[in-house]
Image: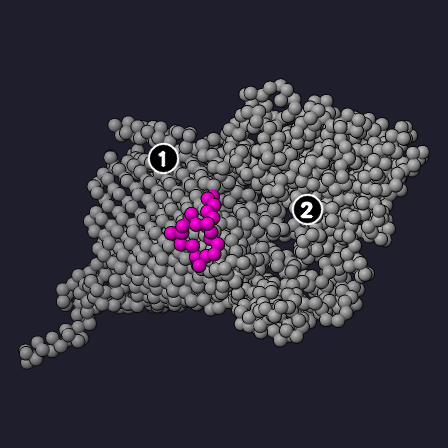
Amino acid sequence: MKIKVIITLFSLAFILGSCDKILELKPGNEELYEDALQTTEDLQNLLNSSYDVMANTYYGAYQNLGELISYNLAIPRAHNDYTEVYNRATIFFNGTVGDLYGEPYTSIYRANFLMESYDFIDDLKEEDRIRLEAESKFIRGLSHFEITNLFAQPYGFTSDNSHLGIPIRLVVKPDPLPRSTVKEVYDQILADLNYAKDNLPDHNGIYADKYAAYAMLARVYFQMNDFEKAAEASAVVINEGNYMLDSLNARWSESISSENIFTLVIASSDSRNKAFNNYRSDNTEIPELYASREYVEGLYGQSIPTSDERSEWFVKMAPTSPNYYYNINKFNKNYFNIPFLHLSEILLIHAESLAEQGIQLSTAVDDINLIRQRAGVSFLNENSTPEAIIAAARVEREKEMIGEGRIVFDLKRRGAKGENIEIRNAPWDCNGMALQFPISENSTVFVMNPTGGCN
Amino acid sequence: MKKFTLAFSFFLFSSLAILAQEVKGTIVDENKEPIPGVSIIIEGTTTGTISDINGFYSLKTDQTMFVLVYKYIGFADHSEEISLSVGEVKELNVTMETEAELLDEYVVVGYGTAKKRDVAGSISSVSSDAIMSVPTPSFEAALQGQASGVSVTQGSGLAGSSSIIRVRGISSISASGDPLYVVDGVPISQDQFITGNSGGMNNNPLAAINPADIESIEILKDASATGIYGARGANGVILITTKRAKGNGLSVDFSTRFAVAEPTAIPNMMNSAEYLQMYQEAWENDGNAGQAILPGGISWEDAQNTDTDWVDETIQTGFKQFYSVGLNYKKNKIGTYANFTYDGNDSYLKGNSYNRMSGRINFDWNVSDFFKINLSTSLSSADNNRVDAAWSGGLGAAMSTALPIYPIYWQEDVLDNNGDTLHTKGDFWNDGANPVRDRETKTWINNELRSINNLSLIFIPIKNLNIRFTGGYDYMRLNEQRFFPADYSAGDSRGFSDVNSHVIDNYNISFVPEYSWDYGEDNHFKILGGVEYQYNKTDGEYITLQDAPGLIDNNINRGDSNVVVSPYVIQEYSFTSYFSRFNYNLKNRYYFQVSGRIDGSSRFGRNYRYGFFPSASAGWIVSDEDFWNVDFINYFKAKASWGITGNANFENYARYGTFSPVDNGGNYGGNPIIYPIRLENPNLKWEVSNGIDLGVEFGMKNNRITMEISYYKKWASDVLLQVAVPPSTGFDTFWDNVAKIENSGIEFGIKARVYERDNFSWTTDFNISRNFNKITSIGLYSPDAVGGGTNDTRVVVGEPVGTNFLVRYVGVDPENGRPIYLDIDGNQTYAWDPKDRVPVGSVLPNAWGGWTNTFTWKNWSASLLITATLGANIYDSSSKRQLGVVTDWNMRTELFDRWTTPGQTDAEYARLTMDEANYGSSTVWINTDQWLKKGDYARFKNLTLAYTFPKIGKDKFSFSNLRIAASITNFLTFTNFEGLDPEIARDFENNADRNMSQNVTYLTPPQERTYSLALSFTF
């Protein structure tokens, strides 16, 4: 009797509790994967978020760091993290650098997530899948490339590019990864961009299309000093892409300029970290970032503005004081779309790549003169030597792309090519020219960048 | 003559009747041997006698109804109710029982009680006396020094602040390392971070518990004791048992206490002249000429005419008052214990107090022999009047950004260029830090309403079968209300109010049958089983009100255009559990226990829905064996246990892979976006702790001396890290079971009645614990994967949890006064670079202990508790700003010992500068081991002097236990630490910070010293 009572009670107890549902408590404001990803539209929305992160990354956060390690800017006024970058002595606690480092990887993560999620989707058509995959790979290739530019020594730093690049992220997982070599990184970038080039549509609204992939390839090959392929890719954009130079300031506007090849769109309501605002001199605050005298006076002389319309981007402040300085007014706008890839850059890559090969020199001169014409600068002689064309292309690039963060990569490219390049009295390949990784990237399999050597 | 005699007799009776009645007899022990020296006292009086060499005693008295109490060392107190007729001489022989039998003392264990003698696990009990004897910010602070293996770091001087309690070291990193708190069988809500780190303080969920309600606290330490709590037992379990009716009839007890509080230490900040001198020196050292430009736009003239002692402006003598009335009624089948307590608790910080009103009714009804009901219900309402502290302001500002050259009020009207008044004389100065203004203008109250209830229905259908259904409900509502008047936030015509509100509902139901039986005379069995379900939900909202007249009240019009209501996302978790425990006792000499628990939790990942947690233990009373012939040890028990327990106190939804919903408000080019928030971790599970415990308990001289020695070792694996995953993964953090931690240690405790004779006694209670802690793995992650907040403690393999990971500081270069550091290879350098950080210390104590000595003489008693902590480092984190680069922080006077002249070799601090580059750094936050100090200390934690009056009055209206006591806490500290107070529990950002960064001080208010006077009695 007793035993029966006891056994009954114990079994009753276990039956009472054996209900697994009461352990399924889901987060309130978030959706589980399987609920969030059901249709092709959901995948598109996921892809949108990857673009969305890029719009944040490239609204100055990325570009400013490139400008700061170049000679274009003067020492920042107060921003501690920026000053470290300017001094080319970033430590691994630098929050601004660390945050920026993570952003392109967030785009990559979302792109990778998309490419691993096809099984969730019931209505996925093959053509949609290919387009989504091509866009994802475009974003992944672009992102890997831009991180490498800032955080590793450039392509060509070692002859076989066996020097350390960055971690390559191709799958979604939380584990630490080691750095791949720069060769491996570039191989992956090219693989992704070539897939994108072959599979993206000719036109794709505000999203990346075929010509965006070609333009990206031109940028990458040029950075590799592979002039033949850089010229080829840029020629496709110039000849087939139907882009036209716009008025000088149209690139930085609320509309999408006719010269934009790939635009990151920004709306007035976007609450982004608009890092280009660090240049703004149109409100009461004194701008954090402003041009160096070396840059302005080296390109335009002591007295601005000159007949070159681009000199109007600079305003000499406190002109009578020995402490005078140059504000940059190019970004004095509440918001604008970001011309991430534009025809001016591609024309100059095209011109310089041709000149480097010593071929189609008149085409190269025409490319440069298109840019000069818009700026109101006298034309380059049709019979210029390759050296003169190269020199002209470089000057135009420096003038045209101030604030876009790319001039320093070009200096590094030239250093890797064997030119004797010094940037603010430091060699192009001193340790600090590659920004330090954030400490959170460190692991037992990871090697941080060496520091120092630039001062 | 006869008449006279009669009259004389009456006279004798009425005046000299003292010796009219008599009780006499012989006192023997269980072996019929007489016991000399037994003290025999009439309870509640000082009337008494002592037995002679033959055990004979005789006591004459005028009383007729009284209780005689017989006391002798090594024997249980014995009492007899005496009723005499006038003139009666009563013979009363007494047999006293040795106290060995007294080890039949009961302790509370998980889901029941057990004889202490029968328990083979490690359990420490702390009585209500120890908890009530001193004013503490919150009851758990009183556990300090009371139990071996339990390290208690009391909260700061902030009213209501929480202590850090660690049971046998720490084996968690990102998950909470706190023990599980169970009140009357209900695991309570114990989240320290409901409101995060608000104003330099974490909300203390335990502060609402009324210490006067507590009957006892048991701390379960080893795996066999905590095993029955399965996935939540790994960090120890603290069982709080509240008072229930006892005795017979009605009694009322009353206690009150008044206390004043002051800080244990006053920061030695510079005054105006000193600050200006140092500031100017740094200015000139940096190559500047003329007078330095002062912070806050202050002119030199104004600065020199101002000397505000901000420390003095932010501290006070706090006043504390405590009143508690308890009602105890027990008759026949009904028992009721009720209590009402008001605890008004000002801290030494101006404007800061924690005032709690609480009531409790515990009701027991033995309906029949087969059915009993136990009900416990309590309600507390506490108002915590908040002030900014630490980094947030108040005393923290007085120690940092509130400069002595800053005035409290504008000294005259200030006009702008147009002649309009900018500032009016007498208004609060607001061009820089002004903690007085912050305190006086802002209203800031945390109100906590807490109710902990449970109802048990106990059925006893057959003898020895006990079936208990229990339902528990723990309710907590925390409202943090603030009001900033108009002049605080410019542009608001009246002011700004907000309320940060959280409600936690915590339900618990359990069903626990227990059956015991005997087989023959020697075999005793007990089996317990049970199921339990717990569900916990946190809901809340944040409301702001623009143009507010004052604090937001409950009737706020939510539709008002000035009101913004933002609901918080509901947080839920649940546990379902099945457990069983089996005890076998052979001959009351050999004890065996096995237990097992299966826990499922909503927090565990898809692949680990349930965990199984077994334990086993054995105890052997060796002294009961025939071969035992060690005469001076009358009791000897050896015990051993093993078990696996878990820790599941971590984030609720970390296991899920989730997406933001499509209506998240974001878009790209007008197109909706969705994005993954968290990566799924289907393997997320509890932390595993595999532990052994070996111990002996022994008693000597009839248990006049008892000792307990334990050795333990715990291997924790699957320890959770909320890793700052490499940013290249694309997301921020991830909860992963990756780390391994080992703890081992030795505990020693001794209790002795050293001297007990002639109305004088001395008892001593000493315990000391040594813990070794080591992280043995953190997977592939680097030491920086989990940072202890901003405190520069890290997880380093081979080092303890909470390792100080700092650049090494060598000293000042005598030639140029620059600080010299060591790089990672040990070479001297001027450059401070975080890549050169190495493990240099640990904030965890290696050893700690408590020593209580109690002396009684007649009705007087004196008790002294000394606590000590050894082997912990203190990281005096704010010193880097108070003694570092000269900025707009005030400095401490130690900085006078700075380098000034080439060749100076004895300077403690570097050449003053305002440019961090001169200290080799690009930041003024230069963390080095220069600020790492030895944290060893011993302190007189509490001294209490008490007098207990003899019983006053008679019969029903008598006062007994009337006691007056005076106490001082924290009144003497022995330490080499030069900072404020070596006992530090600062404000924390999260559990990892709390686990890793105790003993890091950052403008942390020091402990309080209290002087109190207490009165208590029963009638």
Circle 1 residues within 10 Å: few <14, some 14–19, many ≥20: many
Main SS, magenta region, reads loop
Picture coordinates of residue B990 (x, y %)?
54, 47
Q: Is residue B103 above or below residue A115?
A: below
Picture coordinates of residue B125 (x, y %)?
40, 51
Quarter of the image that includes the C terminus of chain B: bottom left
Q: Is residue B684 above or below residue B17?
A: above
Residue B888 at least partly seen:
yes
Kindly identify which chain the residue marked by label 1 belongs to.
B
Query: What is the number of the mark on residue A284?
Result: none
Q: Specify the amino acid type for callout 1.
A: Gly
At numbered mark 1, what does the secondary structure look like: helix, strand or loop? strand
Query: What is the number of the mark on residue A333?
Result: 2
Residue at 73% of width from left, 39% of height from top?
A: A251
Residue at 76% of width from left, 39% of height from top?
A: A247
Residue at 57% of width from left, 60% of height from top?
A: B1003
At numbered mark 2, what does the secondary structure look like: helix, strand or loop? loop
Picture coordinates of residue B865 (x, y %)?
46, 61
Question: What span is colored magenta in the figure?
Answer: B545-568
Circle 2 residues within 10 Å: few <14, some 14–19, many ≥20: some
Residue A161 at least partly seen:
no
Kindly identify which chain the residue marked by label 2 belongs to.
A
Q: Which residue is mark 1?
A: B530
Residue at 77% of width from left, 35% of height from top?
A: A245
Q: Is residue A235 above or below residue B498?
A: above
Side (left or right) of A410 relative to B486 = right
Choose between B50 and B175: the one closer to the eye. Answer: B175
Q: Specify the amino acid type for callout 2.
A: Lys
